[in-house]
Image: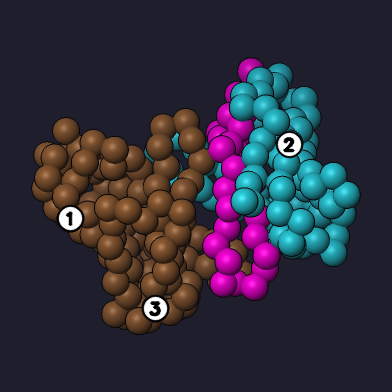
Amino acid sequence: GESVGLHLPTLSVQEGDNSIINCAYSNSASDYFIWYKQESGKGPQFIIDIRSNMDKRQGQRVTVLLNKTVKHLSLQIAATQPGDSAVYFCAENAYSGNTPLVFGKGTRLSVIA
Amino acid sequence: NAGVTQTPKFRILKIGQSMTLQCTQDMNHNYMYWYRQDPGMGLKLIYYSVGAGITDKGEVPNGYNVSRSTTEDFPLRLELAAPSQTSVYFCATLADTQYFGPGTRLTVL
């Protein structure tokens, strides 16, 4: 069945360095991908999304890269700050709106001051 | 806009008790979802709805029921609470992206 997973369950990064969080997906029909940030005790918060007709999308300090050939997604955070410490989830679906998002397990990012 | 609101924030149930987790949205979104998140894990879809009067099972529907009589409300019902239902429950809507509520932390003892 479809699955979305993450390569690294935990990631520790020095403040000011760049962070890279990876995600693999198995459903080749998926064409919409989202990264969420979840802080302790809160619900997931949208960070950035990308459609399958794109390889790269940039936001404020964040970049998402999509490699459809190997079904791989990554989130890059530039100049990581203590406020970036959270669990990050990738999610995917076929963007029909009728197919619910499938979430990965998450990667915990810890920023070392 | 309040967005997606959930009540209660916390609840402790005894085995066999029942309760309803409330979810309300004021964004007029058709799509609504219920997820559960176990400690250290991702979100698993329980039920979802593509509009008033329509509901569908997700990945883990057993032990739960939902209804969608209005666009705004999407309550989740637990009829016979079990310890395996101890989790954090998130309600969400979908428009341009998915919007999540703050969650309900449920403990079944």
**Display colour for chain B:** brown
> The disc numbered 3 marks a residue on which chain?
B
Q: Nearer the viewer, residue A57 or A2?
A: A2
- Tell me if residue A111 is in the magenta stretch: yes
Q: Which residue is mark 1?
A: B79
Q: Nearer the viewer, residue A12 or B40?
A: B40
Locate residue A27, reporting x and y percent.
71, 54
Tell me the SS state at disc 3.
strand
Q: Which residues are magenta?
A: A84-113
Contact between marks 3 and 2 (CB within 8 A): the answer is no
Badge 3 amino acid: Ile
Q: Earlier in the sequence, mark 3 or mark 1?
A: 3
Work out whether B10 lies above or below A58: above
Q: Quadrant of residue B76?
A: bottom left
Quadrant where the C terminus of chain B is found in the figure: top left
Q: Which residue is mark 3?
A: B54
> The disc numbered 1 marks a residue on which chain?
B
In the image, farthest residue toward the front: A1
Contact between marks 3 and 1 (CB within 8 A): the answer is no
Badge 2 amino acid: Asn
Q: Residues within 10 Å of mark 3 (few under 14, many from 20)?
A: few
Work out whether B24 lies above or below B35: below
